[in-house]
Amino acid sequence: METTIPGELHVANDVLADIVGNAAMECYGIVGMTAPTAVDGISKILPVSRLRRGVLVKPEDGGVKVDLYVVIEYGTNIAAVSQNLIDQVTFALTHYAHVPLTGVEVHVQDVKVRR
């Protein structure tokens, strides 16, 4: 389909968070997502149905900023996994949702052994 349709497309932040959460779980070295606020320093891995709780999408001038709260697999290189995650999320949002990004930040909440 090469016909251009006039108008604007608005994608809800929850939809963007779902896209980001699914992209994150496909990355090597990511065990799971956690809630942004870990009570008493204990991070709990969220079930797949609630992946968006580990993703914060904030609209900014010129695009959106994404904060990811993740648990990384023990024995992996944190910097390499984080960069791979940033690349995966950037690709997913720019390719599938055509959303301009102002930044992607990865917050490693915990390191666990994958079961």
Image (spheres, rainbow, N blue to C red):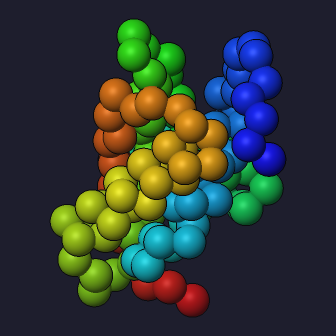
Is residue 18 in view? yes
Picture coordinates of residue 61, whole percent (x, y): 39, 10
Q: Which of 1 and 59 is in front in this view?
A: 1
Q: Residue at coordinates 74% horizontally, 43% vertically from top-left?
A: 2
Q: Nearer the viewer, residue 73 or 106?
A: 106
Q: Residue at coordinates 75% horizontally, 14% vertically from top-left?
A: 7
Quarter occupied by residue 48 = bottom right
Picture coordinates of residue 74, whole percent (x, y): 34, 81
Q: Residue at coordinates 42% horizontally, 38% vertically from top-left?
A: 67
Quarter occupied by residue 66 = top left
Number of on-image labels? 0
Picture coordinates of residue 19, whole percent (x, y): 64, 49
- Horizontal side of 64 relative to 25 (left or right) equals left
Looking at the picture, does residue 41 appear above or below residue 79?
A: above
Quarter occupied by residue 87 = bottom left
- Horizontal side of 112 relative to 54 (left or right) equals left
Q: Nearer the viewer, residue 39 or 109?
A: 109
Q: Which of 59 and 48 is in front in this view?
A: 59
Looking at the picture, does residue 13 appear above or below residue 44?
A: above
Q: Looking at the figure, which quarter contains the C terminus?
A: bottom right
In the image as oriented, which residue stretches furthest toward the top? 61
Q: Residue at coordinates 47% horizontally, 72% vertically from top-left?
A: 27
In the image as oriented, which residue stretches furthest toward the front? 3
Looking at the picture, does residue 27 appear above or below residue 39?
A: below
Is residue 43 in view? no
